[in-house]
Structure formats: structure tokens, C-alpha cells
Amino acid sequence: MKKMPPSAAPVPPPTGKPERWHIDADDADVATLVIPADSFRTRHFEIDCRLVVKPLAEDARHGMRVDVDGNLEWTRQAPTENPGATDSMDYHFRRELPAGVPLRIVVKTQAKQARRVRLSIEAEEQG
């Protein structure tokens, strides 16, 4: 069997389609999204974390914590407003993933006198 020199190592063909990763955790209090590593290229992602709640009483509050690869990225707590409707909390950030490196995003939520309606994380690769 003929051995190929390192410069001739096979490279997967580009798909031409940006990656999109998404998790909808419904009304759960924690959501985790793992983007696997790509062995061949660096990727750039726009990431959106979203919590939607419905207030159950006047003193309702909700909060969200975003951890990236085990480190705190962002946290916030706020009064839940819009009686009879829903309120939301969003966090948007960007991340570069070098070749061979995965990304793990964990969103933890809190709700006091509010009901969780939806928790989601979405990551879209940018060209």
C-alpha cells in the first residue's frame, strides 16, 4: 500500500451549506447544545439563547445563566412583565471554533411566580 505524504492527506469536500445546530427544550429548566468538533476547519458561529416565560403573579421573576465550555458567559435576572401574555430573555454571542475543538453551551433558568414556556439554543455558522 502506497503511503501518501502529509500534504496529500484527504480533505472532505466542502458542503457549501452553513451548519445550523438547534435545541428546543420546551418548558425544561436546563438546555444543553453540543456542537461537535470539525477536524479540518475553523468555524464561526452566531449563537442565540432564549427563555420565554408567562407570569403567574404580580411579583414574578425569571433568570437565565449561560455557560460555555464550563465557564460563565452571561447571567441575568429580571421581573417578569406582560401580565396575561409572555415575557422573554435573550442572549446573543459569537464564538470561533478552531479545528478539532467542540463547543458545549448550557443554559440554566430560574422562574419565580412564572411558568417556563420555551427554552431554546440556536447556533448558525457564519461564512
Image (spheres, helix red, strand yellow):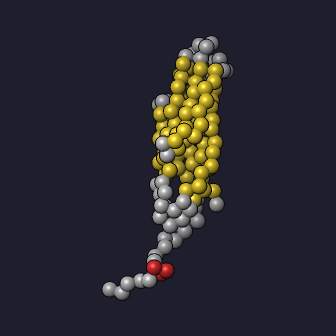
* For residue 65, above or below residue 4: above
For this rendering, which residue is in front, 12 or 86? Answer: 12
* For residue 25, above or below residue 8: above
Q: Is residue 111 visible?
A: yes
**Left or right of residue 106: residue 46:** right
For this rendering, which residue is in front, 9 or 87? Answer: 9
- The image position of residue 18, as x and y in percent, is 58, 59
Q: Is residue 120 visible?
A: no
Residue shown at 50% from the left, 33% from the top: 108
Q: Quadrant of the C terminus?
A: bottom right
- The image position of residue 4, as x and y in percent, is 41, 83
| Residue farthest top in this picture | 58
The quarter of the picture where residue 41 lies is bottom right
- The image position of residue 47, as x and y in percent, is 60, 46
The quarter of the picture where residue 79 lies is top right
For this rendering, which residue is in front, 124 or 26? Answer: 124
* For residue 91, above or below residue 27: below
Residue shown at 44% from the left, 83% from the top: 5
Residue shown at 56% from the left, 45% from the top: 122
Residue shown at 48% from the left, 37% from the top: 31
* For residue 94, above or below residue 63: below
The quarter of the picture where residue 76 lies is top right
| Residue farthest right in this picture | 82
For this rendering, which residue is in front, 18 or 7? Answer: 7
